[in-house]
Amino acid sequence: MIGTQSTRLIARAIWQSLLLVTLVFAGLEFVFKLLDEMKSPYAQYTLTQMVGVSALGLPRRLYLDLPLIVLIGVAAGLGGLAQHSALTVLRASGLSIGQILMKAIVSLVPLLVGVLLIAQIGMPQAEEWAQSLKSQYTRGDSSAALWTRDSNRYVWLRGDADGSIASWRHLTIDPDTRQLATVVDSEQVHLDSGKVRLDEAVQLQMTAEQIVLTQAPLSFETGLQAEGVRWLILPAEQLSLSELWVAQQFLRSQGLEVRQHAQVFWQRMTLPVTLTVLALLAAVTAFGSFRSMSVSTRVFAAVLAGLVFKYVVDMAAPFTLLVGWHPSLAVLLPLVIPMLLIPRLLRQ
C-alpha cells in the first residue's frame, strides 16, 4: 500500500512541476519566436498569421528545451516534497533513497517514451506546417537550391519540401581527361519512377575540338526520388526519426555527407537517456543534510550543471564531426558531468 501511495505522491509532485515549468518555457519561447517574426524584413503577414506561425513553431523549441524542463521540473517537484518533510516520512516508512529515485524515474516513463513518438509524428509535422504557412506570407521564392550528386552527374537543383523540382542543371566530367564534358539545363523537370524527364533541355557537349549546343527533351535514369529531394531540401532538424534514418542510407549510397542527419538522429534517439540522467541529477538535490546545503542551493546547482551540460553538448556535436567519432558520443560523453555530480550531491 505504501508503495502505491508513495509512487502517486512522487509522480503527482513531479508532473505538477513539469506542467508549470513547461507552461513557463512555452510562454517565453512563444514571445521570443513572435518577436523574431516581427523583426523579419521579409514578413508580409498580419499579427494573427504571425501568432499562428509562432504557435506552430513551439513544439520544436520545447523539444530542444526538454532537458532543462525535466531538470527544473524534477528538482522543483521533489524539492517541494523535501521542504514539507514528505521525503523524510517516506524514508521513515522504509523506502531507501534508491527506491525513491527509481519511483521518480518510473513516473517519467510516459515522457521518455513520448519524446520518441513526438520526434516521429508530432514535432516535424508542426514545423513543416509552420514553414509552409510562413512561406505563404514571405516575399521571394520559397524553394531552395542546392548541389548534390547523382551517379556520375553533379546536379544543381531548385526544389520544394514536397519533393517537386522547379529547375535542374547538371554537369558531367570526362573520366579520362577530367575535363567538363556536358552541361544540361532545364526549367521543366519531371521526376517519376527513377527517371528524370527534362523538357526543352539545353545541352552543351564539349570536346577538345568543339562545343555543340542542342535543345531537345532529355530522359535518363536517376537515383533521386521525390523523398530524396525532400531530404536534401529540408534541414535535418525538420525531418522525422524514420526520415532521418532513411535519409542517411540514401545520402550514403550517393556518396554524400551524412554527418548532420546522423547527428540529429542520434541526439533524438539518446534523448530518453539524457532525460533519465538529468532527472536523477535533479532528484538527488532533494536529499542530504540541509545544514550543509539548502534546497534552493541544491536546485541551483542542478540547474547550473544542466546548463553546463547543454553547452558542452552544443560544443561536442561539431567536435565529434571533426574527429569522425560516432554521432551518439556527442550526447553520451557529456553525460559524465551529471553522473559525477550525482554522488557528490548525495554525500552533502
Image (tube, rainbow, N blue to C red):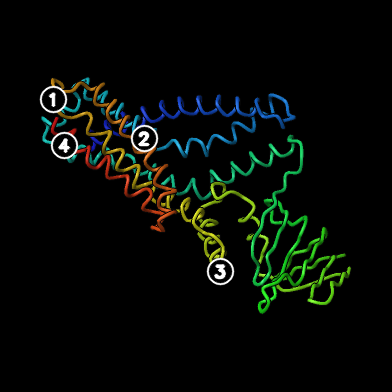
Residue under label 4, please give it: 97
Which amino acid is tagged 2? Answer: Val
Compared with residue 1, is residue 172 higher up or lower down, i.e. above or below? below
Quarter of the picture containing the N terminus is: top left
The mark found on residue 263 in the picture is none
Which amino acid is tagged 1? Answer: Ser
Closest to the observer, 173 or 248: 173
Which is more N-terminal, label 2 or label 4? Answer: 2
Q: Position of residue 183 (x, y in %)?
A: 77, 66
| Separation of marks 1 and 3 at Cα, in angstroms | 58 Å
Report if the CB atoms under discs 4 and 2 are less than 8 Å apart. Answer: no
**Quarter-of-image position of residue 173:** bottom right
Q: Position of residue 179 (x, y in %)?
A: 70, 72
Residue under label 2, please give it: 70
Residue under label 3, please give it: 253
Q: Position of residue 172 (x, y in %)?
A: 71, 70
